[in-house]
Amino acid sequence: MTDRLYYEDSYLTEFRARVVDTSPDRLRIYLDRTAFYPTSGGQPFDTGKLGALDVIDVADDDGQIAHQLSAPLEASEVSGLIDWPRRFDHMQQHTGQHLLSAVLVNLFDAHTVSFHLGVDSCTIDIARALEPAQIRDAERRANEIVFENRPVTIAFEDSSQDLGLRKPTQREGIIRIISIQDLDRSACGGTHVRTTGEIGPILIRKLDRIRGNQRIEFLCGMRAVKRARADFDAISSVARAFSAAPDEVPALVAAQLEKLQESEKARRRVATELAQARGRELYAATAPGPDGIRRVVRRVDSLADDLRAEAQSFTAGQKSLFLAMGENPPAVLLASSPDSGIHAGEFLKAALTKAGGRGGGSVTLAQGSVPSKDLLDQFVLP
Ligand SMILES: [Zn+2]
């Protein structure tokens, strides 16, 4: 069993140790003692150095801690150095989780069922759903306890006694217990800060429903500060675009969105009216064939709504046929006046079937698609 130096002192960043075992390639190293934390209990592993070599992974290998190195280690004794900014960030997030989980139980009887410490954010899943107002209460209470700067202590106690833990443990024998004064006692093997003040600000972010639980995303310490800074910068850039104050942004965006929807409706109406006018003009300008039918064939990039309006407006005139082919995606539109002698739906359906496409429509309007734009050449007016 490796002697875990972080059990007693999470602030230890340098240590010396003996190599007790290695993998044959000497990339995986086992020491008699280590300050490196292995991935476990929702907290990721530490990085750092063994001698001059980078520690790229640390795992709990059946009670032994395995250090994975970037290159083979030849020495039999080595000094270790923990990447402190990474470790301290983990300590802040992890202690913040204990605090937040305890507050959620105290205020709302909401028990934490799992915890994840990620690269960008942390989450806890709780067994019941809370309202946004309750979440804000929990966030405020958690931060009050941060400001009270309560001691966070490590103790080793026998599991045969009543340990008064927030979450009962299955472990037996000597249990490592992390306590936040007058708030929480948890069985935990992770690394924690020594006072709640060191957690820094606690910021709750997203709420999600996951398999009947509620997932709460939160950030502690410098992560919370960085996130608040990024949020402010983002909101400020939107506010600048409106020449407004950041607090006015939500109302302004909502008002702009409504305006945009109204303008879009008006634009569509005008586009349709314009297309209808074009259809009427085109009808007037198109000479009838020897059979008295006016024909228009159009090849366009894509079949837009206003082209359909133009076609229908054209065939609102007597004895008329309007065929349009769009290339992206490959599609065909046929409009016919009722007195043209052509059933648009039936005629187009037959032509589409021949071209390996699909579609159909009514007596006066039909539409369909074909597998490739090369097939569009097959479509001609009768
Ligand atoms: Zn812990």
Image (spheres, rainbow, N blue to C red):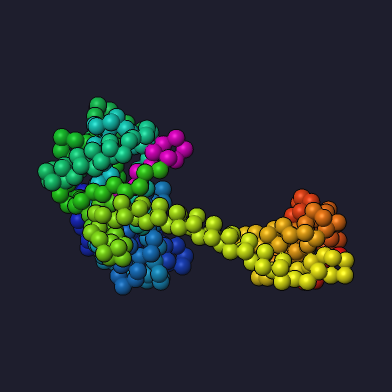
Q: Is residue 15 left or right of residue 332?
A: left
Q: Residue 333 lies in what quarter of the image?
A: bottom right
Q: How many marks?
A: 0
Magenta stretch contains residue 103: no
Q: In this rendering, does residue 140 appear at all?
A: yes
Of the pair 295 and 259, the residue shown nearer to us:
295
**Residue drawn at 26 percent across, 64 percent down:** 243
Looking at the image, the residue that sits furthest to the left is: 148
Residue 32 percent location from the top left of the image: 31, 56
Of the pair 285 and 88, the residue shown nearer to us:
285
Q: Residue 304 lies in what quarter of the image?
A: bottom right
Residue 175 percent location from the top left of the image: 27, 37
Looking at the image, the residue that sits furthest to the front is: 284
**Residue drawn at 28 percent across, 37 percent down:** 133
Of the pair 70 and 167, the residue shown nearer to us:
167
Q: Is residue 82 above or below residue 216?
A: below
Q: In this rendering, does residue 153 appear at all?
A: no
**Residue drawn at 29 percent across, 59 percent down:** 235
Name the magenta segment's main secondary structure.
Answer: strand
**Residue drawn at 78 percent across, 62 percent down:** 320
Residue 265 percent location from the top left of the image: 50, 55
Q: Which residues are magenta?
A: 209-218
Residue 203 percent location from the top left of the image: 26, 49
Q: Is residue 179 left or right of residue 123?
A: left
Q: Residue 78 lies in what quarter of the image?
A: bottom left
Q: Is residue 221 left or right of residue 328?
A: left
